[in-house]
Amino acid sequence: MDAIKLHFTSFGKAQFSMKKFLLFFATSLLFSSLHSQNLSWSHFTDSIVTFSSPRLADLNADGVMDVVMGGGVDNVPTNYGVIAIDGDSGHTLWNVGSQDEMFSCPIFQDVTGDGNPDVFIGGRNAEFKAINGLTGAQLWEFFPTSSLVPSDSGWYNFYTPQWVPDQNGDGYMDILVANGGDHSKLPHQTQRDPGFMMILDAATGNILAKAVTPDSGETYLSPILVDFYGDGTKMIVFGTGGEHIGGHLYIDSLSNLMNNDLSGATTLMTGANTGFVAPPALGDFTLDSIPDLVALSFSGVATAFDGSDFSTIWTKTFPGKESSTTPVIGNFTGGFESDVFLTLNRGLTPTYFDHYQYMLDGASGNIVFKDSIGDLEFAPPVANDFDLNGRDELFFSVNIKVGAGYRNEFRIVDFTNNFTSNFMGFYTGTNLTSSPWIGDMDGDGSLEIINVRRKANIVPIAAIGIFVQRINTFFSEPATGIAWGHYMGTNSDGHFNRKGGPCLGSTLSSGFAATGPTCNFENNGFADVFATGGTAPYVVNWSSGATGTRADSLTAGTYYARTT
């Protein structure tokens, strides 16, 4: 793929700059042939539920990534707080017990020096553990088991953590994590203890920094880390409030957190009666190569912010709907900006009547796609260019009501052709909150999918066990990489993933010629693209909406052309 940026000045001159992007060739793949996939293995863990999503790392150095996730039952000790499954065979590698449910997602780093990644994961009631990835031995826990009640010491839930650069000079990345949220409180109990943003020493679990939220509000949101300008200045985005309590979305520097003070944080959004639960996501909605932020409040207000100055790009409100589901970022429209996919629920928690999915054009916030796929839909999908046409599709793990129960099925949404396809068959049970994982587990060039579902199909919250499945596919990873491969993105950090680099050995390149408009406000400019190399026929898509080698009726402005 070759991309051209073309700028017309207001007086008719044309200025050009060309920027090459990663090239891939579209192949003919019909979603009607998606049944050429197979279930490699299925692993069952009894007597738990899960709100965690699977993440993968090669724990035993066999060349195949293994599956790690949390589980348990709210306020009940379990032997299966953290489970690790061999990615090749589906056999249990190890289980680690916990005093309460481990509902966050793991992150990985080798702190034992054995060359294998170790596991870091949090959960309810001050549960946060570091685990030897190879043996399953506990390295440390934040609040050791005792007769003390964590909430009496002001400690509540730990959410999904992020890595930050080494803060204490021991050679290991350290942990950014939020603690807060007393979920035992009833909706009318508005007096809530404050939440904290924290930095933990990855090697020991010691607190390196701790700051109360600026509004002293509770927190349920997993923070994200952003380096907007690529200059090493790290910013954290975090939120307060919940399903029944108002709150704010904030941004502040990591350095201020390391000074134990977030009181000067910038407020990005405010919720009067509800707060912010879903982690924000990052893409590029303005084509300036600076990450832009999109956040979805619990009350159904989505806002995109320009990463260069935090000004609002667009806001979209969904009246009568709520959401605790993180946005998913992909290239869905075929434009040059990142696009946004949202999952919302109609009603008031805990009673919802319908579940809706929306795809928004990342540049404008306009709704491009709306559907109501499945029942009890809270898990965000994943995004990938399955058919290698340059546009991402969505892969859903959905629940379908059948009689008195539910079954778990898979769907792929193809925005190019505007249709939804079934993928494989169905399984008895439900998947309420676990995003699938998609990637190449074993380096064979084909993608695998990890799906999690609960055994319960009549009463989905019943703690009667969970299944973890590995599905082998014949899809190839696109040259641009997996756009959004699991919960909080392919790299687990909330960032849209789009690789750049050499062009797969192709010689495709594009030249261009342009004639600017004859005067201000005229629309008689035009431009032509000339492609050489690669494999004809060539497809040219313009940011103006034109297709083909020529774009006509251009006014003064900046235009992009992508040749494949």
Image: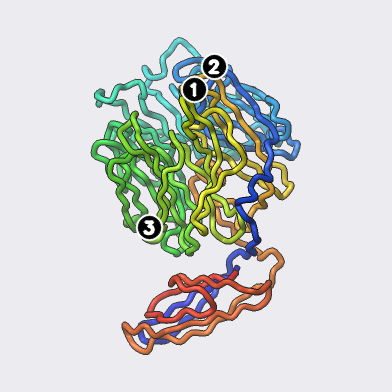
> How many marks do you count on the picture?
3
Chain-order first, disc 1 or disc 3: 1
Q: Nearer the viewer, residue 362 or 222?
A: 362
Circle 3 Cα neighbour tier, 10 Å, few/some/many (<14 / 14–19 / ≥20) = some
Compared with 541, 166 (above or below) is above
* Residue denoted by label 3: 306
Q: Are marks 1 and 2 in contact (CB under 8 Å)?
A: yes
The answer to whether the residues at label 1 and label 3 have Cβ atoms under 8 Å apart is no
Residue depicted at x 34% and y 29%: 350
* In this picture, residue 142 sits left or right of residue 135: left
Q: Residue at x 45, y 58 (%)?
A: 284
Question: Which element carries disc 2, helix, strand or loop?
Answer: strand
> SS class of the residue under badge 1?
loop
Location of mark 2 (residue): 78
Quadrant of the frame with the N terminus: bottom right
Q: Which residue is mark 1?
A: 101
Q: Give the amino acid at mark 3.
A: Asp
Determine the image quadrant of residue 83. top right
Which class describes the residues within 10 Å of circle 1: few (<14), some (14-19), or many (20+)?
A: many
